[in-house]
Image (cartoon, rainbow, N blue to C red):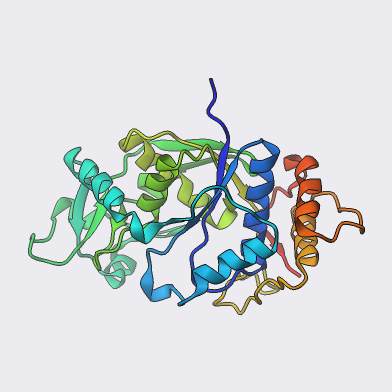
Amino acid sequence: MRAPYRGRFAPSPTGPLHFGSLVAAVGSFLRARHCGGDWLVRMEDLDPPREVPGAAEEILRALAALGLDWDGEVAVQSRRTARYERALERLAAGGWTYRCNCSRAELRRKGRGGALGPIYPGTCRRSPPAATTAAAVRVKTGDDVIAFHDQIQGPYAQNLAREVGDFVVHRADSLFAYQLAVVVDDAAQGVTEVVRGTDLLDSTPRQVHLQRLLDLPTPGYCHLPIAVDAAGAKLSKQTGAAPVDTERPARALRAALAFLGQPSPPPRLSEPRALLRWAVGRWQPGSVPRRLTITFP
């Protein structure tokens, strides 16, 4: 018997909700509600230097104003670190991790260039630093291909050893890496499908690798095209993306639906929850553009 559908939206509190994040929120919400499932919200606040005070609350207020009502309590990653610690211990017990004190400059100098950046050459796997030295923790990768079928983008495959190398799961500044935290949380929350932007498509094989090592279920994946500006940069706080105008929620929702290739709601629908109910019943995943990026506006 298949588990009931559970989806999620997991923003980082680095600024207010902007159009790029709205697309991910709307896409994941419509998918979950169309499947008759739950839609969870998780605040991914594991990188304090990048966070903006009050941004988490502002994001939640924006979601509510847009009629994007979530199920249950909002999960907050900074309150869940004990789970990540147990997962890290389990990886270590299986002999899958090692300490690494290579700097980014060393990696750029010694690592072989790859499509995703410098590929870690395994320096500390061969010669780990002393236990008294501050270090990150990397997880070992094998020379096998991890492949999955994305509901929007189609088949995707990656050889982690050749294209990424051993990757960090715990940083030298004692913060847990995104790749580990997201895997632990998706499993703990019973997420059955991850709907998010294509900027995280190439992270998925690393997450599948961790799921296998930790004996956790692998959810389905659905990567939506991300919004970029005229220069091709992802819309973000760093690129000056404007906050979503919650005073005109229907306009913002209509723009997100159009971006996702969905039918246009009739003009009479101006209340956001009514508009979303209409869109849920007409959700067409096959109409979402099979593209990595779309320029907006």
Horizontal arrangement in the rendering, residue 125 relative to residue 69 (left or right): left
Residue located at (42% from left, 33% from top): 217
Depth check: give the residue in front, 200 or 265: 265
Name the residue furthest top: 1
How many marks on residues?
Answer: 0
- Residue 271 shows in the view: yes
In the image: residue 200, left or right of residue 105: right
Q: Residue at x 53, y 50 (%)?
A: 201
- In the current view of this chain or complex, which residue is farthest to the bottom? 240
Residue 204 place in picture, x, y as percent = 47, 46
Q: Left or right: 37 with respect to 50? A: right
> Which image quarter: residue 18?
bottom right
Q: Nearer the viewer, residue 295 or 22?
A: 22
Which residue is more in the foreground, 266 or 270? 270
* Residue 258 x, y percent position in the rendering: 80, 57
Q: Position of residue 10 (x, y in %)?
A: 51, 56
Q: Is residue 249 left or right of residue 129?
A: right
Q: Residue at x 25, y 68 (%)?
A: 173
Which quadrant is home to the C terminus?
Answer: bottom right
Instruction: Judge whether 68 appears above or below 190 on screen.
Output: below
The residue positioned 45% from the left and 42% from the top of the image is 189
As drawn, 93 above or below 262 = above
Q: Is residue 292 visible?
A: no
Whole-percent x, y for residue 187 in the image: 41, 40
